[in-house]
């Protein structure tokens, strides 16, 4: 096949997923997009305003072509951005999250109906429709598009809100169709409410059988107990097609990532790694962390983690020096702490994939969690 024909094919191809190996419900696969392929499991780099402000960019990522960049369409569209790569020279695959998180964090400023979301911020009234979200994503060169979805705080006691969330999300998804279906995900909503999840899963299967190639699970990671989170992930996965890629929205803490991989999830996003690094919490093996601000690290010449190969640890910079820089709010020190935490997760999923390929995921997770 000629090179120009391959390029043309790539530009119109739908999201595809190839499973290379399975270990129980866990999968090692390849997510295929028009821009290229990504090995899974994998974590995204959520490029937030905080990362922009602290100078975190492609140079802080070991291999940017092997990472999905995620940006929030809610904020990018609001500030008039025309390109998903605006402000960052990203060479790899991109994903846009439509902003379901804001439905909770900005709830008092929002009004929602079957036509979309209206909000009033900074004295400006704006309305966003499901159609507009996907139109923006297509025009901005997004490779993987999350549609507008309706999210409810997981621990809310009103069961009807979750039913309504699943129904609104289904309506919004239908109104997102026909624009960039080859890039579009379906987002399963419903919190911890099984009836709401069944409604959402029914519509997800319907859409996945009718031209949609990928699915995400949303509406979790909102203070619910971990066992409840894992049970709901398992509940959803058992009712989703085996041959479609599955994305986990808002999950990136190491233990949660591993447990969701074990249950059949493929890709993950979240801001916890870089956010906690920005606040001085350093992630280490075992799903643990330490606070760099503590006085015990004032004269500690060790690197953050002697087993870590991230740019921060590989540079040899000491805990003492990073602590001093952090205390002074030094831009470089904070960027390095953020980079370390993000790389911890990057290595975590790479090692998990290697374990799945040889059928040793449970052994890997047990060994990881047993490290003191």
Image (cartoon, helix red, strand yellow):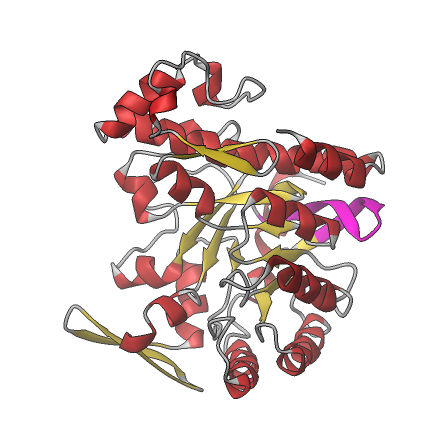
Is 83 on the left-hand or right-hand side of 176? left
Outermost residue on the front side: it is 296
Is 280 on the left-hand or right-hand side of 309? left
Segment colored magenta: 17-34
Which residue occupies 70% across, 37% down? Answer: 352
> In this rendering, does residue 33 appear at all?
no
Location of residue 345 in the rendering, given as x and y in whole percent from the top left corner: 56, 37
Outermost residue on the left side: it is 123
Q: Is residue 18 magenta?
A: yes
Q: Is residue 287 above or below residue 316?
A: below
Count of residue discs: 0
Q: Is residue 60 magenta?
A: no
Which residue occupies 75% across, 33% down? Answer: 354
Location of residue 158 in the rendering, given as x and y in whole percent from the top left corner: 50, 84
> In this rendering, does residue 221 appear at all?
yes
Residue 255 sits in which quadrant?
top right
Location of residue 52 in the rendering, given as x and y in whole percent from the top left corner: 30, 41
Q: Which is nearer the eye, 158 or 93? A: 158
């Amino acid at each position: 096949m000629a090179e120009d024909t391959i390029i043309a094919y790539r530009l119109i191809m739908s999201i595809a997923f190839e499973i290379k190996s399975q270990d129980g419900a866990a999968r090692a696969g390849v997510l295929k997009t028009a821009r290229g392929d990504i090995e899974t499991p994998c974590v995204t780099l959520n490029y937030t305003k905080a990362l922009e402000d602290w100078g975190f960019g492609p140079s802080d990522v070991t291999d940017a072509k092997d990472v999905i960049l995620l940006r929030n369409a809610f904020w990018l569209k609001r500030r008039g951005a025309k390109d998903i790569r605006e402000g960052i020279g990203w060479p790899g695959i991109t994903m846009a999250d439509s902003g379901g998180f804001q439905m909770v964090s900005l709830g008092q400023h929002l009004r929602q109906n079957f036509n979309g979301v209206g909000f009033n911020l900074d004295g400006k009234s704006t309305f966003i429709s499901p159609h507009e979200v996907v139109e923006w994503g297509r025009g901005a060169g997004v490779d993987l598009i999350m549609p507008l979805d309706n999210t409810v705080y997981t621990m809310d006691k009103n069961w009807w809100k979750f039913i309504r969330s699943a129904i609104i999300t289904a309506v919004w998804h239908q109104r997102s169709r026909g624009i960039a279906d080859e890039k579009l995900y379906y987002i399963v909503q419903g919190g911890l409410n099984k009836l709401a999840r069944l409604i959402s899963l029914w519509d997800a299967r319907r859409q996945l059988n009718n031209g949609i190639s990928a699915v995400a699970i949303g509406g979790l990671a909102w203070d619910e107990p971990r066992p409840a989170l894992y049970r709901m992930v398992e509940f959803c996965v058992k009712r989703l097609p085996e041959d479609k890629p599955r994305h986990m929205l808002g999950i990136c803490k190491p233990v949660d990532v591993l447990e969701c991989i074990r249950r059949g999830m493929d890709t993950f996003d979240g801001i916890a790694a870089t956010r906690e690094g920005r606040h001085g919490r350093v992630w280490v093996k075992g799903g643990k962390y330490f606070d760099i601000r503590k006085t015990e690290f004032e004269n500690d010449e060790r690197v953050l983690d002697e087993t870590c190969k991230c740019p921060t640890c590989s540079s040899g910079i000491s805990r003492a020096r990073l602590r001093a820089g952090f205390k002074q709010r030094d831009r470089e020190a904070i960027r390095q702490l953020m980079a370390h935490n993000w790389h911890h997760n990057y290595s975590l999923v790479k090692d998990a994939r290697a374990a799945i390929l040889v059928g040793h995921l449970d052994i890997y997770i047990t060994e990881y969690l047993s490290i003191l």
